[in-house]
Every structure is written in structure tokens, then in C-alpha cells.
Image (cartoon, grey):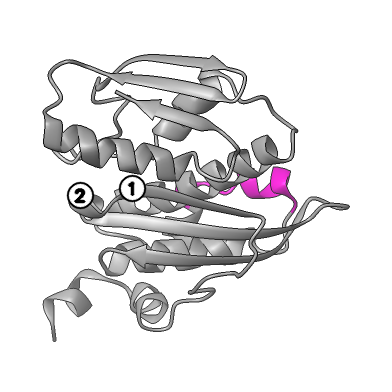
Amino acid sequence: MSMTSAMYTETVLDHFINPRNAGQIKNADVTCRIGSAACGDLVRLYLKVDPKTDRIEDIKFESYGCAANIASTSVTTELAKGKSLEEAKKVRFKDVVEVLGGLPRHKVHCAQLATAGLKAAIMKYEAKTGKIEVDEGFVRRMLAGVLDPAEGVNVVAAGRIRSIAVDGNKVEILLTEDVDEETAKVLAADVREVLDDLGLEVTVG
């Protein structure tokens, strides 16, 4: 028995080997990423939403990470597909862990990442369709999906954000002075990807 098999339930292994809803959606209504390849866990979600009913018609994902990451995201998409946006917002990481029959304690963060990605994708869709305003609070919540490669936690929690200013479609994000040049470049690229497709002019410095 491999170490991976010994760590995980049969359900986790099934979703890892045969992930549901894996891949991309061409012409998706919204694409959202959360996590960082540098930290080892990265999820990108694609949503297709019925504008009349606000139901998630289709959802797919790409996951770059461990078995728990892939399995957690697979289950998250299953729990969200066909649901209204409001219903999908209520999908909790504990629900994902329960469906999987449990996860090792040090892998529960994978379920948290997957469900946080779902909520971020919904929030991004709502901003894109004018249901919510793109303000400092929105930007700060979206930045929770950008991980500091040095700390392994999101840049807000890591204290890497000095200020956020939103003026119309212009967003200026200032990093703290202790962020080195190489890390700043990585974070700037990740921030722009998280906020892309919203018609924003994003500056990170």
C-alpha cells in the first residue's frame, strides 16, 4: 500500500483518480483562481451561470496540487453545480470533508481553499454583472486568494498590503516596504490575474 493510499479514504482516492468537472469552460462567464503554484496549491475555477435564474449551469476546475486538493475541488464543484448562487455560497469546507469521508488534519486546508475559491468566483461574477460594487472591501476579499509564497498564507493575513485605493475602474495596491523585488513581481502577477476580466486598471507597487 502506498503512502498516499494509506493517508486517504476510498472516496478521496476516487475523486483524485477520477475528478469530476475537471477542465476548462470555453467562454466561461467568470474565471477565478485562488492559491499559489509557489506554495504548492493552486485552483482555477470556471463558471457558467444562467442569468435568468442565477443558477450555476456548469462549473469546471483546474487544480495544481496534491490528491486532497484535487479531490476537495472535485467535490466542491459537485456540490455547487445546478445550485443557485446563493445556495452555492453556503457550501462549507466541512461539507466537502464530510463527503470525502474525512481528510488528514494537515490537509483540511485543501477543502478550505476549494470552497474559498468557489465563493471568490461567485463574488467575481456578481461584480462583473454589476450586482455588487468593486470597492476596497471587494478588492481586499479577492486578495484573500493571493498567497504569499514566503508565508504560505494570503497576502492580507500575512500583512503584505499597505493600502488599497479604488477610483472608478482604477485600482492601486501598495505592498509593504519589506517585500523584496522578486516576491513583489510574483504577487503583482497573481493580483492582476485574480482581478482580471473586470475591466479594471490595476497597479501594484
Element type where label 2 sits in the image: helix
**x then y, percent, for residue 124:** 59, 41
Numbered circles on residues, count: 2
Q: As displayed, is residue 71 above or below residue 34? A: below
Is 130 in front, or is 145? 130
Q: As displayed, is residue 156 above or below residue 49? A: above
Q: Is residue 200 magenta?
A: no
Q: CA distance from mark 2 to mark 1?
A: 8 Å
Q: Please report the residue visible at 43 percent of the width from the left and 53 percent of the height from the top.
A: 114
Residue 147 image-quadrant placement = top left
Is 194 in front, or is 91? 194
Q: Please report the residue visible at 61 percent of the width from the left and 70 percent of the height from the top.
A: 26
Q: Amino acid at mark 2?
A: Cys
Q: Are marks 2 and 1 in contact (CB under 8 Å)?
A: yes
Q: Is residue 128 left or right of residue 142?
A: right
Q: Is residue 87 magenta?
A: yes
Residue 65 image-quadrant placement = bottom left
Mark 1 Cα within 10 Å, few/some/many (few <14, many 20+)? Answer: many
**x then y, percent, for residue 8:** 27, 71
Q: As displayed, is residue 100 above or below residue 179? A: below
Q: As displayed, is residue 141 above or below residue 88? A: above
Residue labelled with disc 2: 39
**x then y, percent, for residue 54:** 79, 50
Is 44 in front, or is 179? 179
Q: Quadrant of the C terminus?
A: top left
Residue labelled with disc 1: 35
Is 145 in front, or is 84? 145
Magenta: predominant secondary structure element?
Answer: helix
Q: Which portion, as a residue range, is magenta?
A: 84-94
